[in-house]
Image (spheres, helix red, strand yellow):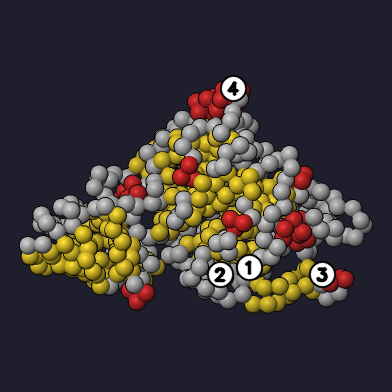
Amino acid sequence: MHRSWIRRATAALAALLAVPLAATTASASDDVAPPAVASLPLEQNGGTWPTSHVQGIAVDQARGYIYYSFTTLLAKYDFEGNLVGTVEGFTGHLGDLDLDPESGRVYGSLEYKADEAFYIAVIDGTEVDEIGIDAQTSDVFSTVYLPEVHDDYAADMDGDGKFDGNVGDTADHRYGSSGIDGVSFGPAFGTTGGERLLTVAYGIYANTSRTDNDHQVLLQYDVSDWARYERPLTESDPHHAGPAETDGKYFVRTGNTTYGVQNLAYDAVQQRWFLGVYRGTKPQFPNYLMFAVDAATRPVEGDLVGVPGPDGEGTERGLLLALADDDGTLDPETGIRGWEQKSDVGLQPLGHGFFYLATNSGTTGAQTADLRLVRWTGDAEAPFAPATQAELARTCTVDYAVHGTWPRGFTTQVRVRNTGTAPVSGWTAAWRFGSGETIDHSWGVETEQGGDVVRATAARWNASLAPGDRTTFGFVGRTTSGTAAPSTVTLNGFPCSAA
C-alpha cells in the first residue's frame, strides 16, 4: 500500500485520539479453548475519532476482535481494548457492519449519494493489522454495487423528468428510499436454518407528507459468488459491478422512521431479526426505536399500504414480513409492536442471550463509542440488562469423563447441559488436549481437530438445547502419553463449569 507523509501524520494523530478510555474484560485462563468469546469484554470504548458518530459494529468471536464503523473510518480492536488497525481514505458513508465468521471478512453498507452509487463494502478483517490502511490503494477493501438500491433511490416518482437528489422533502425516491444502512447475515426469510444470506436494509427519509414510506425495505443476497463482482474502491470513477437481481425483496410495516433501519441483526438464539431505527415523527404511529421479525414466519404477498400501484391505480403489492406477534409493546391503534430501546448505532447478538449494544457520544470531529455487554430479558419495557462475569460463567456445565484407557488409546463420554436462561440453537463444544491426544472417531457430534484444539459440533438431532436441557456425546482417541480431562470446555465459546 502507498501513503503520503500527510496520511501517515493523520493516522498518527488518529491513533493518539483513539486510545480507549476503559476496557473491562471477563477473566479467562490461558488454556481456554478458542473461540475467544470466553474473554468477551463487559465494556469497551471504541476510541475518539475525527469523524461522524459510530454507525455499527461487528464482532469476530472466534478471533477475538471488535470492529467499529465511524462513517469514514473502520477501527479494529482486540478484546483487551488494544487498537489493532484502521481503514480510512474514503469519503462515502460506511454504515452498519456484520461479519462472515468463516472468512473473517466484514461486510458494511457504503453510500455515495451524489454519484448514486450504493455498495456493500467487503473488508478482509484478517489483514487489518496497522493504522491508516488506505481503502482505495489496499486490496483489503473491495466493493459490490447494488443496482436494486440505485433504482429505488433514483426513481423519479412524480414524473417531472427531474430527479431531486439527496432531498427528503420530495415525491422522488421509491418507498422514500435514502440509500442503505442496516446489514446482517441470516437465513432466508421464513426459515431459521440453511444458507446464510446477506440482508440489506434501506434508509428511509423522514417525510411526514407521504403515505408510501411507512415500510422498511429489506433485500436478501446470496454472496457465495460475489467474487466476480468485487472491485477496488475508486471514488473518482465509481464502478457498477453487482448482482442484477436480489434473492428476495421484502417489506415490514413499522410506520415511517428517520432514515430507516440503522442497525439490522439476526439472533439465532431467539430466531429473530432485530431492526434498530431512529425514531419516526408521524404522529399516527407509535414510533418505536426497535422492532423484531420472527424468522420462521413466512413472507406473504399483500398490499403495501399507502403505496400506489402501477400508473397510480390501486395499491402496490409485495412480500410482507409480519412483526413478531409476542415481542415488545403492542400499539392497539396500528397493531405495531416494538420497544423503546436505543439500538441504532451498534447491535450484535453473541449467543446464549448475550448482545453488544453501542452508544455514541462526542462532538463534531471527536466522536466516540461505548460498548456494553447485555443479556436479553424479554421485558417489554427493558429488553436488555447489563451482563455480569458471573452470568457469562453460568451458561453451561460439562461432565468430561474418561471411561477407559489402554496403551495407545482411550474412550471418553461428555455430557453438556445448558444452564443459561436462553436456548442454544446449534452448538460447538471446544477444548484443548494436553498430552498429544488425537480423535479417532466420535458419536453424537462432528469433530474437527487443529493441533491440540478440538471442536465438536452438534448433529442435527441434538442441535437445540432449551434451558436445562442436556446432551451426551463421546469419542475414541489415540495417545502415546495418557489422557486427562481438559481444564476448560467451552460451549459456543462460553466457558462451562464442571458438573
Is 72 left or right of 79, judged from the image as shown?
Answer: right
| Mark 1, secondary structure of its residue | loop
Badge number at residue 247: 1
- Whether 238 is drawn above or below 151: the answer is above
The answer to which quarter of the image holds residue 384 is bottom left
| Mark 2, secondary structure of its residue | loop
Q: Amino acid at mark 1?
A: Asp
Viewer-side label of 4, 3: 4
Badge number at residue 188: 2
Is 416 left or right of 61, judged from the image as shown?
Answer: left
In three-dimensional space, the C-alpha distance between marks 2 and 4, rounded to whole angstroms, equals 47 Å
Nearer-N-terminus badge (4/3): 4
User: Which class describes the residues within 10 Å of circle 2: few (<14), some (14-19), or many (20+)?
Assistant: many
Which quadrant does the C terminus fall into?
A: bottom left
In three-dimensional space, the C-alpha distance between marks 4 and 3, rounded to whole angstroms, equals 55 Å
Q: Amino acid at mark 3?
A: Pro
Measured as percent of width and height from the top left, residue 398 is found at 22, 62
- Residue that numbered label 4 is attached to: 5
Viewer-side label of 4, 1: 4
- Residue that numbered label 3 is attached to: 308
In three-dimensional space, the C-alpha distance between marks 3 and 2, rounded to whole angstroms, equals 27 Å
Is 461 left or right of 367, judged from the image as shown?
Answer: left
Nearer-N-terminus badge (2/1): 2
In three-dimensional space, the C-alpha distance between marks 3 and 1, rounded to whole angstroms, equals 24 Å
Nearer-N-terminus badge (3/1): 1
Is 455 left or right of 381, judged from the image as shown?
Answer: left
Residue 257 in view:
no
Residue 148 in view:
yes
In three-dimensional space, the C-alpha distance between marks 2 and 1, rounded to whole angstroms, equals 9 Å
Residue at 48% across / 67% down in the picture? 271
